[in-house]
């Protein structure tokens, strides 16, 4: 209503200016145009923001940073209408004395005016001009100019209180995202006939969490497991099984034996010429869909699939299998398309494609007529773009594949499958898992660590930790088991996700199970404590819901105010991760939220008790609502990270 009223006033003012110009009473035509442009811009801003408010569902959480960017963007445009793409910098303030947020655009505009218009204007003067043009809004209490030109923004308490009440009544809702998009995430991707090892841990955990985030944001997510389930290695393996495991057409060896057979077949392939020839014959028979060879291959795949599923069940991972075999029939069309468009060169019998900006070509057909990983990756890219109609493609693959994937993506652009301005195709690279010796994580004998062993070790250590804390004496057997699973798998996931994925990280059970510092153990314990506050005060969910509808959240104490603002930063944290895919930002935020809550709880009584009797004498309901809002946001954060909290620990 306020915005509608201002729109009426602005429209009348613009009409008045028009009339003034017609009557010839304007002091200057240039001044009239300038004033008219500013008013029109402000009118457009208000009309746009009003329309956006109407379009938003009542439930979506407001991204305060985005709101402030819109407000300051409008102010800058009104103050400097001739500047093209002026810098817009709005960040949360690091200290309370600098307000709640800061707009730090003035310095950049100073440089821009000097460079484009040869004008020397001080940042402070620019900051003053920006503040004069801030449009009417319901979130800013006041602004102050500090130092050389920083604009300190103080939020309105009633605005923050209202947003917290909305969160409590509607639950944690995603920020408004615009058009719903099709997001395809390629992650995990183990190899058939090999056990999953610690190297698969990061792709699986990071990929699952990214899928959860995009799903929560309202997108349509396709989770793809690009299994290594085709190629020469299966010819080698079947040839070896013919010699060593005569029942291979009836039953596949267990996964451990399969891996040993695989290693042995590779040794024979490299050293025995006769075996190598037979292995190639097996590959040809498999590729030509010989029924016996297809049956043997399917049995091998089934055994592997069951073992992979055990891991996925432990880690609560959901993924759709679509291995390299899925794309086999598309390979010849890929080669033909590149040939038809004149991109193929023949080099020593191989068909290769050079991509601008990359020195190593893609080999799309070997000299013997076989296809390569390059061909199958191109086929997968094409299928995801043109058949699945993906708007966002994310490949969660280790950093070692960076050049290969960038070359494949560039080839897709070159041939016209997608325009990067319209479709986002991204390699979400990650570093390796290191042991405590800072070398690649291995067993004592130097072997790769099996993932199932790692998870079982995590369960054992989590139970030891819980028993050290004498939790087995206060929890039921069922509660203890739930706490063990929550701590074990939560700590393994969080240790990975809390590190910047681009870096290597050191795997240490001792560190990840520490209940101090930025660990899942600390956060899970903090969460159960917060959830227990209302329960111990005999306040049930219905009472909290009623209070959320009726109570005004008072934010007079500095720690209440700090916590309230921290809770409401959740949408801007998620928005940032949707853009840069760096999930450690969410972990850092949850840790900050938990520590900010502790400050609040230590300084603000939620439940007041008689010191002698211990009887509850007063319940400060608005503070219990702040506890509830904190726990609600933490629970959603845990859900995105794939961590399952428990009510009692």
Image (cartoon, helix red, strand yellow):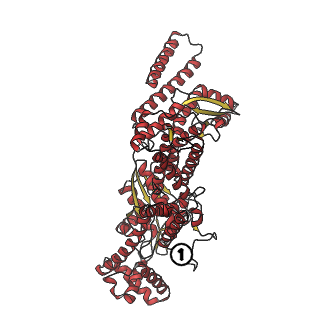
Above or below, 557 against 278 in this view is: above
Residue 465 in view: yes
Where in the figure is residue 383, as x and y percent of width and height?
38, 60
Above or below, 618 against 283 in this view is above
Q: Residue furthest front?
A: 612
The residue pinned by badge 1 equals 448
Looking at the picture, does residue 385 appear above or below residue 568?
A: below
Residue at image location 56% in from the left, 18% down from the top: 32
**Where residue 306 sits: x, y (%)?**
37, 72
Q: Secondary structure at mark 1?
A: loop
Residue 601 pos. (x, y %): 57, 44
Density class for disc 1 (Cα within 10 Å; few <14, some 14-19, many ≥20) is some
Residue 25 image point, x, y percent: 55, 10
Name the residue furthest left.
291
Quadrant in the picture for residue 119:
top right
Q: From the viewer's side, name the closer residue of 155 and 284.
A: 155
Towards the viewer: 51 or 65? 65
Residue 583 visible within the image? no
Q: Nearer the viewer, residue 124 or 332?
A: 124
Quarter placement of the N terminus: top left
Q: How many marks are shown on the rendered structure? A: 1
């Amino acid at each position: 209503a306020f915005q509608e009223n201002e729109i009426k006033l602005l429209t009348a003012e613009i009409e008045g200016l028009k009339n003034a110009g017609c009557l010839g009473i304007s002091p200057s035509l240039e001044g009239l145009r300038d004033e008219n442009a500013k008013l029109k811009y402000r009118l457009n801003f208000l009309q746009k923001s009003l329309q956006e408010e109407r379009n938003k569902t009542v439930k979506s959480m407001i991204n305060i940073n985005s709101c402030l960017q819109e407000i300051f963007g409008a102010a800058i445009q009104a103050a400097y209408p001739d500047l093209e793409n002026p810098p817009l910098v709005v960040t949360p303030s690091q200290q309370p004395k600098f307000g709640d947020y800061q707009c730090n655009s003035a310095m950049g505009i100073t440089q821009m005016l000097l460079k484009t218009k040869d004008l020397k204007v001080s940042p402070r003067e620019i900051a003053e001009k920006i503040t004069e043009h801030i449009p009417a809004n319901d979130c800013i209490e006041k602004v102050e100019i500090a130092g050389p030109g920083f604009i300190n923004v103080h939020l309105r308490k009633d605005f923050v209180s209202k947003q917290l009440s909305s969160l409590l009544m509607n639950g944690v809702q995603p920020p408004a995202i615009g058009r719903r998009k099709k997001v395809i995430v390629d992650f995990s991707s183990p190899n058939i006939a090999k056990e999953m090892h610690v190297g698969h841990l990061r792709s699986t955990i990071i990929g699952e969490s990214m899928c959860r985030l995009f799903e929560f944001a309202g997108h349509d997510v396709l989770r793809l497991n690009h299994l290594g389930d085709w190629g020469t290695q299966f010819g080698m393996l079947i040839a070896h099984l013919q010699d060593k495991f005569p029942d291979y057409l009836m039953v596949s060896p267990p996964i451990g034996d399969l891996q040993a057979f695989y290693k042995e077949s590779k040794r024979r392939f490299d050293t025995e010429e006769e075996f190598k020839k037979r292995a190639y014959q097996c590959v040809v028979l498999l590729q030509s869909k010989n029924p016996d060879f297809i049956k043997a291959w399917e049995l091998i795949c089934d055994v592997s699939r069951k073992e992979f599923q055990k891991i996925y069940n432990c880690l609560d991972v959901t993924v759709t299998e679509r291995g390299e075999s899925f794309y086999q029939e598309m390979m010849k069309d890929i080669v033909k398309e590149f040939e038809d468009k004149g991109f193929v060169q023949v080099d020593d019998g191989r068909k290769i494609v050079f991509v601008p900006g990359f020195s190593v070509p893609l080999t799309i057909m070997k000299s013997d007529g076989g296809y390569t990983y390059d061909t199958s990756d191109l086929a997968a890219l094409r299928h995801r773009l043109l058949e699945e109609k993906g708007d966002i493609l994310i490949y969660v693959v280790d950093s070692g594949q960076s050049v290969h994937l960038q070359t494949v993506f560039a080839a897709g652009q070159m041939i016209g499958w997608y325009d990067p301005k319209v479709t986002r195709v991204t390699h979400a690279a990650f570093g390796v898992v290191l042991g405590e010796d800072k070398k690649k994580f291995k067993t004592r004998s130097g072997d790769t660590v099996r993932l199932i062993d790692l998870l079982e070790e995590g369960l054992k250590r989590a139970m030891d930790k819980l028993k050290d804390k004498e939790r087995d004496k206060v929890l039921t057997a069922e509660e203890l088991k739930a706490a063990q699973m929550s701590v074990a798998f939560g700590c393994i996931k969080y240790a990975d996700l809390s590190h910047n994925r681009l870096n290597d990280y050191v795997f240490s059970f001792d560190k990840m199970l520490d209940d101090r510092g930025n660990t899942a153990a600390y956060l899970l314990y903090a969460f159960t404590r917060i959830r227990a506050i209302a329960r111990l005060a005999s306040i049930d969910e219905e009472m909290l819901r009623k209070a959320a509808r009726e109570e005004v959240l008072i934010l007079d104490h500095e720690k209440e105010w700090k916590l309230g603002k921290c809770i409401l930063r959740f949408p801007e944290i998620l928005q940032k991760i949707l853009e840069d895919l760096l999930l450690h930002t969410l972990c850092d935020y949850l840790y900050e939220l938990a520590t900010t809550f502790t400050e609040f709880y230590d300084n603000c009584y939620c439940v007041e008790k008689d010191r002698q009797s211990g009887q509850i004498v007063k319940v400060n309901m608005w503070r219990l609502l702040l506890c509830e809002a904190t726990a609600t946001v933490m629970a959603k954060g845990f859900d995105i990270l794939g961590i399952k909290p428990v009510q009692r620990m």
